[in-house]
Image (spheres, rainbow, N blue to C red):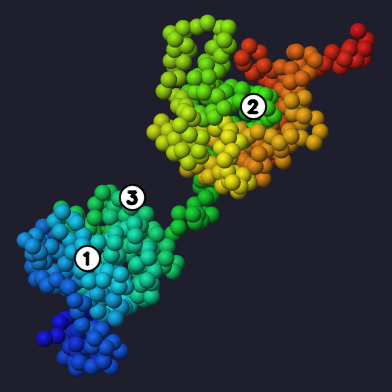
Amino acid sequence: MANFLAHEPCPSCGSRDNLARYDDGSAYCFGCQYHEKPSDQQSGGFSLREKQRTPGMLQGEYKDLASRGLTADTLRRFGYKLALVEGVPVHIAPYYSKGGKMVAQKLRRPDKNIRWAGDKDLRWMLWGQQVWGAGGREIVVTEGEIDAMTVSQLEDNKWPVVSVPDGATSSKGSIEKNLDYLESFDRVVFMFDADEPGREGAKECASVLSPGKAFIAHLPDGTDPNDLLMARKGAEVQKAIFNAQPYRPDSILSMRELISRASKPVEWGATVPFETLNEMSFGTKPGQLWIGGAGVGIGKTDVFTEMEAHDLSEGRVNIIVHLEQSPEETVRRLATKLSGKPFFRPDFEYTEEELLEVMEPYLDQCYIYDHAGSTEWRDIKAFVRFAAKAYGASQIYIDNLTVLAADADDERRFLDSLLKDMKSMAVNLQATIHVLSHLSTPDGTPHEEGGQVQAKQFTGSRAIMRYADLMWGLERDTQHEDEDMRQFSCFRILKDRLTGQSTGKTFWLKYNDGRLFECEAPQEESEVAVNADDYGF
């Protein structure tokens, strides 16, 4: 006796699915009584051997599936059977090749354990595709067999519904393999589960189809079609299909949408501790990458600490990664900035209570990386992402690039990838990431003697210039014969992506008792004397 395989369009009366195809090649139309005898030629060119069942397939029966609200008629429509295997009830979902041969069965146990009979690697069609002929106004794609039958039953088993075979996260490949079939419909509606994997899976699948073909149906959060059927809310499934929205990649924005958003006033960013830098940069903004550099011992880490302390005093949450000083030293230097007391000096005595008194207002605003475990970017990145999301950090400080790149086989490529990664992370976390870099030795005046910082001197300069939103350098003559002159630093803006207006501009800082203050440009004694003569004093 021949076994039923699938419904097909009838070549005589034109019915889309009245023709029943059997595994001996024969066919019979229940509409016009058209029939085909068993024949290689009349079975679409597939040999009788191809049409035989794959050995090892399980037999079962069609019964009402009360636990899912599905009728025996619905199960029969899709060939979905129920059986007892070694005393355990099993659901049997058949899978077919494009030749119309059942090549595999997905076996689902009550504990949701999945096994396969036959050869699952031969699956080519979407689940249920054998039931429906190609072409038509609309087809719905779900992420599971139960959901496919649910949607079909809610529409009286009259309209095409199929399912991807392996759930939302692995579904794109199945869509690509059956693209011609899906493209034959005017409208392809993806109705995946209303959870994060389902939403992302629906977008991935929809992206494969031609523009205008794919639609995404939105169910209530945390539900799937069968959940709604069982809750007697099947009408919401049908409503979601009717109201499905055309798929459009998130990255495409129309000018009509953007005008409304762009018309809002441009906001200032978060302040930094130096007023001139605020005026030049308009503050730090979410998604920006600020990169600073200076020679050895110039004071770039001190600038960082001044900015970190300012953030804390303004109520912002900091993530701090200092790879060339201990976490304890970071705390002492922050306490110095916040109190004006030199907690970092060996000759300054203090108690734990005194340190706590200074830092207590900021205990839940500052999270510091312990680099004793690792200085690998992979580990630091994991820390930064976790801490930023867990504690809502808006400012992230990483000191410095040179340590991160120390073990790289190809420093240039490593830094290019690293800076790209940092910029992407700043955007995703909606935070400002501040990074420090060492400088290469200049051709002229050494940096330690006040030599001017140039962008090309930064470690990984090409990547920094490509990805930095603001790039700054610090210059100081640490060898000046006048001790007071050694305390002055020139802060130079090397790149300003936002407006470009501050590129090349400078202002001055002076170090005093552990703090950095903005100040007027210094004048040496000889310059002061000349100026005095000019004015006749």
Out of 428 and 305, give the one closest to the viewer: 305
Mark 3: secondary structure: helix
Q: Position of residue 405 (x, y in %)?
A: 58, 40
Does 124 sit above or below residue 532? Answer: below
Out of 36 and 368, give the one closest to the viewer: 368
The quadrant of the image that shows the C terminus is top right
The quadrant of the image that shows the N terminus is bottom left
Amino acid type of the residue that numbered disc 2 sits on in the rendered structure? Lys
Q: Earlier in the sequence, mark 3 or mark 1?
A: 1
Q: Earlier in the sequence, mark 1 or mark 2?
A: 1
Question: Looking at the image, can residue 15 be seen?
Answer: no
Amino acid type of the residue that numbered disc 1 sits on in the rendered structure? Trp
Q: Earlier in the sequence, mark 2 or mark 3?
A: 3
Q: Quadrant of residue 216?
A: bottom left
Q: Position of residue 275 (x, y in %)?
A: 64, 24
Q: Which residue is mark 2?
A: 300
Using the numbered discs, state the Cα–Cα distance from disc 1 to disc 2 in whole angstroms: 62 Å
- Which residue is painted at 80% across and 36% down in the image? 443
- Which residue is painted at 29% across and 61% down in the image? 166
Q: Quadrant of residue 243?
A: bottom left
Question: Looking at the image, can residue 141 be seen?
Answer: yes
**How many residues crowd mark 1 within 10 Å: few (<14), some (14–19), many (20+)?**
some
Q: Nearer the viewer, mark 1 or mark 2?
A: 1
Out of 464 and 88, give the one closest to the viewer: 88
Using the numbered discs, state the Cα–Cα distance from disc 2 to disc 3 in whole angstroms: 43 Å
Q: Which residue is mark 1?
A: 116
Q: Nearer the viewer, mark 3 or mark 1?
A: 1
Q: Position of residue 439 (x, y in %)?
A: 69, 34
Q: On residue 196, which mark appears?
A: 3
Q: Nearer the viewer, mark 2 or mark 3?
A: 2
Mark 1: secondary structure: strand
